[in-house]
Image (cartoon, grey):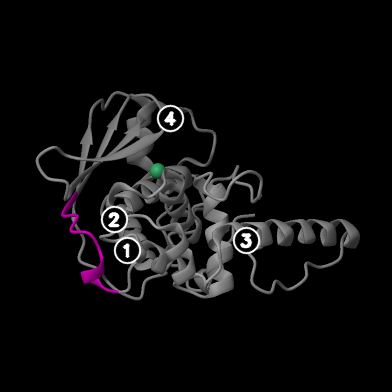
Amino acid sequence: MPVVPTYFQKEMPAVSLLSEAPTATLPIRKHKFPSPTLRLFLHDIAHEGSSIFLSNIKGNEDVEAQVQNVLNLLYSSECERPGTRSVTIVLRSMNGVAYTTGIDLDHDHKELHINLDYIAKTGSPKRHEVLGVICHELVHCFQWAANGTCPGGLIEGIADWVRLRAGLAAKHWKQEAEGKWDGGYQHTGYFLEYLEQRFGEGTVRRINGCLRGKDYDEKRLFGDCCGGHKVEDLWKEYGEELKEKERTKADDGEAPEPIPTHAAQP
Ligand SMILES: [Zn+2]
């Protein structure tokens, strides 16, 4: 199950469901940030993916809602964020799922490319998945990246952590602690959620803030944001906690889940 803290779930607003998906646009917003100009560029209106996108995403609500989710999760005030002034969603056939880029003229203008073939063929509830992809890519429009020196795994982990917190985790996501902490995407995203639970609300926001305007320094970053700990030790402790939970589950059979101390529930 994706981790969505109950205090995010309480005030779920009525979302206009334009199709099948019981998805969430959750109110995690303390601030109303000024929104960038939001645009849509549709390469092929005759593509099945275009119809799915247009019938599942409500243009005057959904993208703006995700912008506010992203900004509220990464920043507590307007002056902390990069100066992104416009985001253009480009729908076209291409390889992969999606990517974000700045335009040559000015990196404050972002293009968020989504593959129409992917939208057409994804088996997940379409609205939930498309909103999840938009949310993930919007993080790339607004996050800091240590002057381009931040490891890609942490960049992608922050993007999927925001997606997780926005209630838009993909159905196939699984919490595990194999390999390295910065394996990226949900693998790192769930670890960041563990850090957020352990060191308090705003931990990931502080990590993102420490990636502003200076080169990547892992020891300093996690030392400053996670109580002086080394990230490798935290990763090990995270793995042990996950294992312990698995053991408890197996031992207890149908017994109720123990109340977590600080780790995210699997
Ligand atoms: Zn990404």
Seen in the picture, residue 104 relative to 247 is either above or below; the reply is above
Q: Which mark is residue 71?
A: 1
Cα distance in 3D space between marks 4 and 1: 26 Å
Ligand 1: which quarter? top left
Foreground mark, 1 or 3?
3
Foreground mark, 3 or 4?
3
Q: Which mark is residue 247?
A: none
Contact check, label 2 and label 1, Cβ < 8 Å:
yes
The residue that mark 4 highlights is: 118
- Give the main secondary structure, helix, strand or loop, of the magenta stretch: loop
Contact check, label 3 and label 4, Cβ < 8 Å:
no
The residue that mark 3 highlights is: 233
Q: Nearer the viewer, residue 42 or 226?
A: 226
Residue at (11%, 45%) from the top-left corner? 106
Mark 2: which amino acid?
Answer: Phe
The residue that mark 2 highlights is: 142
- Other residues around mark 4 within 10 Å, as few (<14) / some (14–19) / many (≥20): some
Cα distance in 3D space between marks 2 and 1: 7 Å
Foreground mark, 3 or 2?
3
Callout 1: helix, strand or loop?
helix
